[in-house]
């Protein structure tokens, strides 16, 4: 068992969750409000709510939201999301099992995110410059066609 903050995660669960992230998930830096710095986000979208509930129960962190359906013919969709340091701790455990370009994103984040994200939110000019370059590097890491 692996401890994630106050969570425990077996290697089997870590590998399974990594597979779900590889297939249906997103590892990115999001901006919640205009003008704010981007924050780490790991999210998984699915029409299978029990899958997302399993992940939520296993990690004991994050949240599930319901997506709006615009047509009666569409299945309801759900998104599991985890942010900031909790997402960082999750990536520490699932990144060895990632197999897509998301592994490259996770490795970049694991190498630089904490050093470029002061807990007090005060960024020096030097850190801000390095953080912008880091954000660009993460966001430009995409699947090859």
Image (cartoon, rainbow, N blue to C red):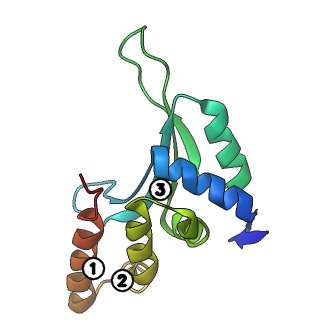
Q: Is residue 6 visible?
A: yes
Q: Secondary structure at mark 1?
A: helix
Q: x, y (%) of residue 1?
A: 79, 69
- Camera-side residue: 71 or 128? 71
In-image side of 61 versus 31 (left or right):
right
To which quarter of the image does residue 90 belong? Answer: bottom right
Mark sitting earlier along the chain (2/1): 2
Image coordinates of residue 15 in percent, x first then y, are 64, 59
Viewer-side residue, 119 vs 26: 26
Decide: is 17 above or below 40. above
Q: Which mark is residue 116?
A: 2
Q: 10 Å neighbourhood of mark 2: few (<14), some, or many (≥20)? A: some
Residue 29 spot, x, y in % from top left: 35, 62
Local secondary structure at mark 3: strand
Q: Which mark is residue 131?
A: 1
Measure the C-alpha gap from mark 1 to mark 3. Answer: 19 Å
Q: Which residue is mark 3?
A: 42
Can residue 36 be seen by looking at this rendering?
Answer: no
Q: Which residue sits at x=26%, y=63%?
A: 139
Image coords of residue 11 (percent x, y): 72, 65
Q: Quadrant of residue 115?
A: bottom left
């Amino acid at each position: 068992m692996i401890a994630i903050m106050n969570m425990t995660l077996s290697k089997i669960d870590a590998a399974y969750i990594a597979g779900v992230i590889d297939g249906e998930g997103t590892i990115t830096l999001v901006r919640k409000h205009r003008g704010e710095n981007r924050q780490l986000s790991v999210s998984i979208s699915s029409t299978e709510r029990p899958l997302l509930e399993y992940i939520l129960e296993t990690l004991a962190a994050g949240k599930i939201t319901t997506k709006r359906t615009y047509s009666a013919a569409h299945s309801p969709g759900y998104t599991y999301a985890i942010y900031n340091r909790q997402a960082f701790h999750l990536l520490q455990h699932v990144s060895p099992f990632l197999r897509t370009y998301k592994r490259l994103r996770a490795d970049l984040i694991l190498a630089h995110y904490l050093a470029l994200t002061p807990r007090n939110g005060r960024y020096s000019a030097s850190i801000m410059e390095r953080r912008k370059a880091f954000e660009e590097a993460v966001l430009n890491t995409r699947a090859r066609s």
